[in-house]
Image: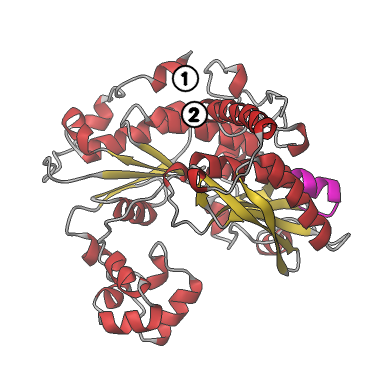
């Protein structure tokens, strides 16, 4: 199959168009590290426009397809000119842009397209780190000798994604993952931006502080109150002032503003014991009020949380349920489990109990979240098993390892409980001509779990 062939290519051939007018990147020596950040532009909306060319040139929003309820999940750049953005209610979105095309969310299709793109990126580097469904970070330090320069690789990535998948993306290039991501943000949409070593502080300086990754709305307001409005001002602010106002994170923010970053964007399986909790949450395109529907969503959340915890080699004991209603009232309800666990059956059962206790009947829910905290390394856990429990536990561990292996290879949703209702058979990528692997075609493989 073409998909499997692509996964094992060492690098992609470059067209004359990509090679043309590209100069060698100065300073691509072995002592420097170089990273690419790939950000798919308006990903959900772009996939829908690709599959329905009649939408080209129109404002398109994914989510909020019900006129009186629902939330926008993504909007293309034409719709954004009217103020539409992710998280906006469908009522407000229709008020701002009544002629926009509102489409239902087809999650499995986007997940499948994303998995194919992530696999194709392995043609360019062995170090591909998916950061979300529409973003990935690649280290290309060791690949520069094959491609001559970082710009050539960036242009080749854009050309490959456009030609194979019919989708636009923005590529940022930088000496660390933070700078590469910021470069992608500055290069949007459908751009390529390179920030060379030593250039980040000057480029970031005029930007508002809320443009920096890791600085949210409340932190920005606190910085404004100190007279710090730009990243340049933050970069040069006295360390003592920042530390007194923000603790240890104050000096870290100043380093980020200068483009200095010694950390890394970690994948789930790299997270250590310092993580306070691991969880997932879902904002629904259409609010839910039926208890059975909410329970089915909790099943899917519990599967994802348990998988993250297992991948990290952890066990957790405190389970927290978060419910947000359509009026944005948010409540959290938690329970200490009888013992530390990474078993999704445990999380499902206790999650349902928390839902029964916390949910106010007939109220519309727009978000559900589930997280597991009080984490320990698996070999430090407090499991107390007798002989028969140990045999049963070993069987369940083997089952989960098999399920996790399938998900590692074919995607998170290749196997799921029917109760989770995470698949709709019509939602899959239909249009690039590659033969579809039946395990990836949107048809669930039902297991015995």
Quarter holding the C terminus is top right
Q: Compared with residue 406, is residue 194 higher up or lower down, i.e. above or below? A: below
Q: Position of residue 70 (x, y in %)?
A: 74, 55
Residue at (58, 56) in percent of width and height: 373
Q: Compared with residue 212, is residue 72 higher up or lower down, i.e. above or below? A: above
Left/right placement of residue 247 relative to residue 149 reads right
Q: Position of residue 39 (x, y in %)?
A: 43, 46
* Mark 1 secondary-structure assignment: helix
Q: Which region of the structure is painted magenta?
A: 287-296
Residue assigned mark 1:
3
Instruction: Tell me the CA gap for discs 2 and 1.
Output: 7 Å
Residue sitting nearer the eye, 318 or 293? 318
Residue at (84, 54) in percent of width and height: 289
Residue sitting nearer the eye, 435 or 355? 355
Q: Look at the image and say whether residue 73 sits in the magenta stretch.
A: no
Rendered image quadrant of residue 53:
top right
Crowd rating for badge 2 (residues with CA inside 10 Å; few <14, some 14–19, many 20+): many
Residue at (66, 41) in percent of width and height: 344
Residue assigned mark 2:
116
Q: Compared with residue 229, is residue 415 higher up or lower down, i.e. above or below? A: above
The answer, for residue 179, to whether it is visible in the render is yes
Determine whether label 2 and label 1 are within 8 Å by CB: yes
């Amino acid at each position: 199959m073409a998909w499997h062939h692509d996964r094992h290519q060492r690098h992609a051939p470059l067209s004359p168009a990509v090679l043309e007018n590209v100069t060698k990147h100065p300073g691509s020596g072995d002592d420097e590290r170089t990273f690419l950040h790939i950000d798919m532009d308006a990903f959900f909306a772009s996939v829908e426009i690709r599959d329905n060319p009649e939408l080209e040139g129109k404002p398109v929003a994914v989510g909020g397809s019900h006129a009186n309820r629902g939330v926008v999940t993504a909007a293309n750049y034409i719709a954004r000119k009217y103020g539409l953005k992710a998280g906006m209610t469908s009522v407000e979105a229709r008020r701002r842009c009544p002629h926009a095309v509102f489409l239902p969310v087809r999650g499995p299709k986007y997940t499948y397209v994303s998995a194919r793109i992530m696999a194709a990126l392995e043609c360019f580097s062995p170090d591909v780190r998916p950061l979300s469904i529409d973003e990935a970070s690649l280290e290309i330090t060791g690949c520069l000798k094959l491609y001559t320069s970082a710009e050539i690789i960036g242009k080749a990535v854009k050309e490959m994604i456009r030609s194979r998948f019919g989708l636009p993306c923005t590529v940022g290039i930088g000496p660390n993952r933070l700078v590469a991501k910021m470069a992608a943000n500055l290069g949007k949409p459908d751009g390529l931006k390179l920030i060379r070593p030593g250039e980040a502080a000057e480029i970031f300086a005029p930007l508002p502080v809320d443009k920096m990754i890791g600085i949210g709305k409340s932190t920005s307001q606190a910085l404004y109150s100190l007279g710090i409005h730009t990243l340049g001002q933050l970069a040069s602010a006295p360390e003592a002032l920042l530390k007194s106002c923000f603790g240890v994170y104050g000096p870290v923010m100043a380093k980020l503003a200068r483009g200095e970053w010694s950390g890394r964007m970690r994948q789930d399986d790299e997270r250590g014991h310092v993580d306070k909790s691991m969880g997932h949450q879902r904002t629904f395109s259409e609010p839910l009020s039926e208890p059975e529907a909410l329970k089915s969503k909790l099943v899917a959340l519990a599967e994802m949380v348990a998988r993250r915890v297992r991948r990290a080699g952890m066990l957790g004991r405190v389970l927290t349920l978060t419910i947000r209603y359509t009026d944005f009232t948010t409540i959290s309800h938690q329970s200490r489990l009888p013992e530390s666990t990474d078993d999704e059956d445990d999380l499902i059962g206790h999650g349902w109990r928390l839902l029964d206790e916390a949910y106010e009947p007939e109220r519309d829910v727009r978000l559900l979240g589930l997280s597991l905290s009080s984490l320990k390394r698996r070999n430090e856990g407090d499991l107390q098993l007798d002989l028969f429990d140990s045999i049963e536990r070993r069987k369940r561990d083997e089952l989960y390892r098999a399920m996790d292996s399938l998900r590692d290879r074919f995607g998170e949703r290749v196997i799921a409980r029917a109760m989770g209702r995470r698949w709709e058979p019509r939602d899959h990528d239909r249009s690039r001509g590659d033969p579809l692997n039946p395990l990836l075609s949107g048809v669930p493989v039902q297991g015995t779990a």
